[in-house]
Amino acid sequence: MSKTMIEFRHVKKIFGGRTVIDDLNFTVKEGEIFVLVGTSGSGKTTTLKMINQLFVQTAGDILFNGQRIKDYDLRNLRLEIGYVLQQIALFPTMTVEQNISLIPEMKRVDKEEVKRRVTQLLEDVDLDPERYRKRYPRELSGGEQQRIGILRALAAQPPVVLFDEPFSALDPLVRAQLQDLVLKLHQKFKNTIVFVTHDMDEALKLGDRIGVMKDGKLLQVATPKEISQHP
């Protein structure tokens, strides 16, 4: 039985007097892709952002690798968690290589090792390292930028990676390619992924388990097969 990587215990979040998340309880197992799906305003992104403490819960506990998140040093916690956003947010004045190298360098990974990782990661996503290494984000297509965003999140080999609706602005073909890419990289790195989407097809394709959210509550947590047969 794989161990629990993330656990929400009676978590509540209030923004400006309004309860956005109410008594949320669920676990994410080590090495699984756990997808939170729901309409806009269901609380899924708020839930995701509490994992890396961009939002701090109002009540309840969140555990990361068996330890309460509030007991971690915040900087160290965030270095253990990769983060891929919808707004790709690459640094425009940095090359592809510098963007990917950022977190490993902050973690003081050896320079030669960082260079090797950049080369390997670019090859993993079918971008020729020699052609792309020195390019700037403005010289890339939207799909290429999002690939680099994913590589930046993976470069320090974090145990957990959060994806916040990363593909919703892309056209269907590019989106399908990037979904396949997430599955391929997950197969390779075996990290734990929490993925937020409003698209049930995307959730069914990617998730080992899916949590369906509405109005700050989890309606169902089940495998894609169970959700397809008994929604």
Image (cartoon, grey):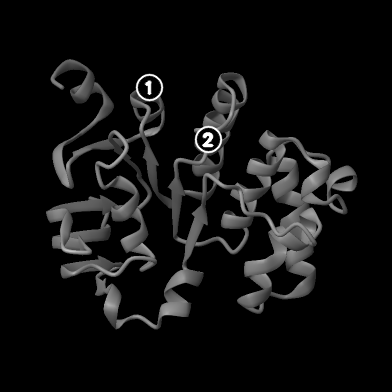
Question: How dense is the environment of label 2, judged by Cα within 10 Å: few (below 14), some, or many (20 and up)?
Answer: many
The relative height of residue 199 versus residue 87 in the rendered view (above or below) is above
Q: Mark 1 points at which residue?
A: 201
Q: In which quarter of the image is residue 221?
A: top left
The amino acid on which the numbered mark 1 sits, given as a three-letter code, is Asp
In the image, taking residue 60 as reference, residue 95 lies left or right, namely right
Residue 229 image point, x, y percent: 17, 16
Residue shown at 58%/32% (left/top)?
A: 178
Q: Which residue is drawn at 27% across and 51% down?
A: 28
Q: Which residue is drawn at 28% across and 59% down?
A: 6
Whether residue 229 is situated above or below residue 140 in the rendered picture? above
Name the outermost residue toward the front: 16
Image marks 1 and 2: residues in contact by CB distance under 8 Å: no
The secondary structure type at the circle numbered 2 is loop
Q: For residue 206, what is the image quadrant?
A: top left
Which label was assigned to residue 42?
Answer: none
Residue 231 lies, with reference to residue 101, above or below; the image says: above
- Could you say where residue 153 lies in the image, as x and y percent from the top left? 57, 56
Q: Report the residue marked by disc 2.
A: 167
Q: Position of residue 92 (x, y in %)?
A: 75, 57
Residue displayed at 62% across by 49% down: 149
Q: Which quadrant would residue 98 be assigned to in this image?
A: bottom right
**Of marks 1 and 2, which one's residue comes earlier in the chain?**
2
Task: Please provide percent x and percent y for residue 94.
Answer: 79, 61
**Figure disc tally:** 2
Horizontal side of 95 relative to 203 (left or right) equals: right
Q: Distance between the residues labelled 1 and 2?
A: 13 Å
Q: Tell me the amino acid under the disc marked 2.
A: Phe
